[in-house]
Amino acid sequence: MEEVKVTELRQNLPEYLAKVKRGQRVRVTSRGKVVAELTPPSASKEEVEAARTRLRGSVLKYDKPTEPVIDPGEWDVNK
């Protein structure tokens, strides 16, 4: 995580906001102590639910997850 002094942040705020917009986190320091952290916003409940809806049914479940899905003799790689 990048650290920036308050004075540097004031002088270059658009640059640091662009970094945060890209997903980076920035710690703001004053006299050597962290006074704030700039982070991208968390996803809203609606965005999380939309992602769940898109992913629903896309994960396969196997009764025996440590066993091969198909007979190893059927794999082209083994031929």
Image: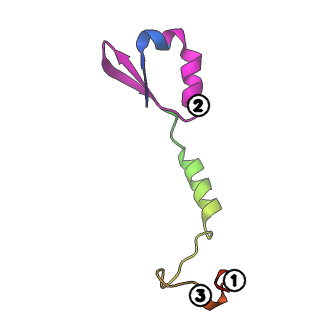
Q: Which residues are magenta?
A: 10-38
Instruction: Looking at the image, tell me whether mark 2 or mark 3 is earlier in sequence order.
Output: 2
Mark 2 residue type: Lys
In this figure, which residue is indicated by the disc labeled 1? 76
Q: Position of residue 52 (x, y in %)?
A: 58, 59
- Image height check: is 58 above or below 26? below
Looking at the image, tell me whether mark 1 or mark 2 is earlier in sequence order: 2
Q: Residue at x 31, y 12 (%)?
A: 31
Mark in the foreground, 1 or 2 = 1
Q: Residue 72, located in which quarter of the rendered image?
A: bottom right
Cβ–Cβ under 8 Å for marks 1 and 3: no
Q: Is residue 19 above or below residue 45?
A: above
Compared across the picture, whether 28 is left or right of 56 comes to left
Location of the C terminus by quadrant is bottom right
Question: Which picture quadrant has residue 20?
Answer: top right
Q: Which mark is residue 21?
A: 2
Q: Is residue 35 magenta?
A: yes
Disc 2 secondary structure class: helix
The kind of residue tagged 3 is: Pro
Q: Which residue is mark 3?
A: 72
User: Which residue occupies 54% across, 77% down?
Assistant: 61
Q: Position of residue 67 (x, y in %)?
A: 49, 85
For mark 1, does the 10 Å Cα neighbourhood hold few (<14), some (14 to 19), or many (20 or more) residues?
Answer: few
Q: Residue at x 47, y 31 (%)?
A: 25
